[in-house]
Image (cartoon, coloured by chain):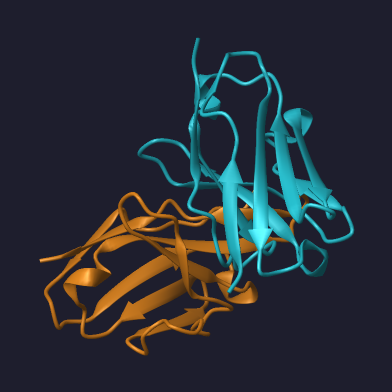
Amino acid sequence: QVQLQESGPGLVQPSETLSLTCTVSSDSISDYYWSWIRQAPGRGLEWIGYISYSGGTNYNPSLKSRLTLSLDTSKNQFSLKLTSVTAADTAVYYCTRGFTGFDPWGQGTLVTVSS
Amino acid sequence: SYVLTQPPSVSVAPGKTARLTCGGNDIRSKSVHWYQQKPGQAPVLVMYDDSDRPSGIPERFSGSNSGNTATLTINRVEAGDEADYYCQVWDLSSDHRGVFGGGTKLTVL
């Protein structure tokens, strides 16, 4: 059964870059689309973007200027980089499979933007 | 951009039927997916493509989509169904993007 696990710093300084990696097990990232979704504390879900098995990407327009998604097929991982972060980027970040109808999800990782 | 509207809260007694709605302009033309999120946990897909249940989801869960409203119906509600439920679609308008509703908190009385 496929499993996803997010990893990365839990604390990021304002104006710095938030970097997260999702490691996929029991499945090949070369076979699917992969997405990131976030949830600010006490708020709803926000779609961040997806990357396809071939490396094609689609980003939330509200984040597009700061966002980069990438794949590392040799490690069966995909990654997120969000630049120039502010407190508004504080959230639990989830990685998940698919570009819609997301399943399954990683457990999520809380990233706090604070000095 | 496309907007999905969910009531903030729904309450239902155990054993009764809960109907969670998701409103959107001509939503019937889109495939609607539903997620259940319990406190401190990641969301779980409970319905996809309007009315298909992933493996492991009880038959008590069903979905429909018509007009401007999609509905997730939970029959014979149990205490363990208490959670936040989010609907989601893929918006194929000018900016292709995933869209979530604001979520409904289901309380089992």
- Height in image: B18 above or below B82? below
Residue at figure coordinates x 66%, y 69% from the top left: A26
Residue at figure coordinates x 74%, y 56% from the top left: B93
Q: Is residue A99 left or right of residue A70?
A: left
Where is residue A21 shown, x and y percent of the image? 67, 42
Chain letter, colour orange:
B
Chain letter, colour cyan:
A
Residue at figure coordinates x 50%, y 41% from the top left: A109
Where is residue A59 shown, x and y percent of the image? 74, 44
Residue at figure coordinates x 56%, y 66% from the top left: A104
Displayed quadrant of residue A35: bottom right
Displayed quadrant of residue A105: bottom right
Q: Is residue A15 left or right of residue B16?
A: right
Q: Quadrant of the C terminus of chain B?
A: bottom left
Near-viewer residue (A70 or B73): A70
Near-viewer residue (B99 or B84): B84
Is residue B54 visible in the rendered image? The answer is yes
Is residue B24 visible in the rendered image? The answer is no
Near-viewer residue (B20 or A1): A1
- Most extreme residue toward the bottom is B59
